[in-house]
Structure formats: structure tokens, C-alpha cells
């Protein structure tokens, strides 16, 4: 295998109805790797979840003091409750330690954001009884299941009364 080849993906994640069930049953989400920088994906996801979801949100970042007007916590262990979902914005090499932290606090779902794929972590998490979602954005999935997406993947906000003309 050359340096540009990636191993084949053999792990299969939950189906769309299973992901919908995970999101519907969740009451709290911890965003690990949350950022207070508006240019970061985690910030965009956090603002969406804060304004468009019923979840209690917790931001995990050992450097930040506050994100979007809420306290930031140094670790999952510092949260005031066990989150239902741990949504991860961390680099690949950090994922095994995030899994260990997730297991230690007793969260039920490990959600790895778009572009994040770690089959060893997924298998270990599933073996320990966790639900695992990889390479999917929780914001996109939530919006998709709750009517906030169009075919391009985002709500365009365009309302039109034009009818399509058929011949």
C-alpha cells in the first residue's frame, strides 16, 4: 500500500432510522474539541444545536473558559451530567483517548464528525456497548431528520411561489 492509499472501510455504522432514533432519544450532547472560533466546524455545529435542537449542550475544551455564553469544561469527567452523545471534533490520533474518556463517564453514544473514521475505536466502543456513528455531521443529520435540509444539504431559506411548468 502506498502512502496515499487508505484501508478499505469494513465497519458499518447505524442506518438512517437508527441514527434518527439516537438523536430523538438523546437529551444531552457534549462536543469534545469545541472551539470558540467562529471559523471552526465545531462552532458552527454548536451554534446550530444551541438554536435548533432541544439538547442540553456541553463544550469540552481544556483551554477555553466559555463558548457561546456557556462554560467550557476541561474533560468529560468535569461535566455536571453524563452526556447521552459525545460528539467528537478531535484529530485521528486522539480518538482512542476520547473513547476511553467516553467509556469512563458512561456515555451511550460516540459520534465522530465528518472526515473522522477510526475502525479500531468503533469496534472497541461497540464491544463495550456504545452506539457509534462515524464520518457524519450531527448538525446535518439533525437538520435532515427535522426538515432543515434541501437536496444540497443546507436550508437555502429561499421560498418561491413559482410553479414548475410542465409540457
Image (cartoon, helix red, strand yellow):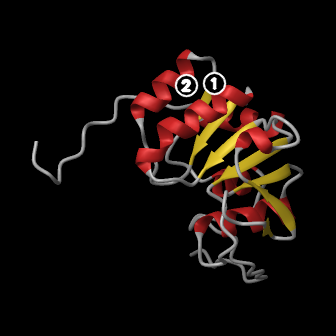
Please tell me whether residue 130 is drawn above or below residue 22 in the rendered image.
above
Please tell me whether residue 47 is drawn above or below residue 162 in the rendered image.
above
Tell me which numbered mark, 2 or 1, is placed earlier along the sequence: 2
Residue under the image location 33 percent in, 35 percent down: 9
Secondary structure category for the residue under label 2: helix
Residue 102 visible to an observer of this rendering = yes
Can you tell which quarter of the image residue 14 is in? top right
Q: Is residue 32 left or right of residue 152?
A: right
Residue 76 spot, x, y in % from top left: 72, 42
Secondary structure category for the residue under label 1: loop
Residue under pointer 1: 130
Q: Residues within 10 Å of mark 2 (few under 14, many from 20)?
A: many
Tell me, yes or no, whether the two marked residues, 2 and 1, touch with CB atoms within 8 Å: yes
Q: Which mark is residue 125?
A: 2
Whole-angstrom CA distance, mark 2 to mark 1, is 5 Å
Q: Is residue 64 left or right of residue 127?
A: right
Can you tell which quarter of the image residue 163 is in? bottom right
Q: Nearer the viewer, residue 93 or 162?
A: 93
Residue under the image location 71 percent in, 66 percent down: 64
Q: Residue furthest left?
A: 2
Residue under the image location 89 percent in, 51 percent down: 54
Q: Nearer the viewer, residue 140 or 109?
A: 109
Amino acid at each position: 500500500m502506498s502512502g496515499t492509499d487508505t484501508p478499505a472501510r469494513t465497519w458499518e455504522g447505524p442506518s438512517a432510522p437508527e441514527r434518527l432514533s439516537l438523536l430523538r432519544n438523546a437529551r444531552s450532547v457534549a462536543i469534545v474539541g469545541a472551539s470558540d472560533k467562529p471559523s471552526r466546524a465545531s462552532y458552527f455545529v454548536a451554534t446550530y444545536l444551541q438554536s435548533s435542537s432541544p439538547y442540553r449542550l456541553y463544550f469540552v475544551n481544556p483551554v477555553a473558559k466559555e463558548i457561546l455564553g456557556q462554560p467550557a469544561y476541561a474533560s468529560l469527567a468535569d461535566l455536571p451530567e453524563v452526556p447521552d452523545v459525545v460528539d467528537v471534533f478531535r484529530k485521528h490520533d486522539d480518538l482512542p483517548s476520547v473513547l476511553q474518556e467516553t467509556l469512563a463517564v458512561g456515555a451511550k453514544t460516540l459520534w465522530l464528525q465528518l472526515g473522522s473514521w477510526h475502525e479500531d475505536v468503533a469496534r472497541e466502543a461497540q464491544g463495550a456497548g456504545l452506539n457509534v456513528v462515524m464520518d457524519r455531521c450531527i448538525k446535518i443529520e439533525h437538520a435532515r431528520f427535522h426538515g432543515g435540509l434541501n437536496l444540497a444539504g443546507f436550508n437555502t431559506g429561499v421560498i418561491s411561489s413559482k410553479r414548475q411548468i410542465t409540457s
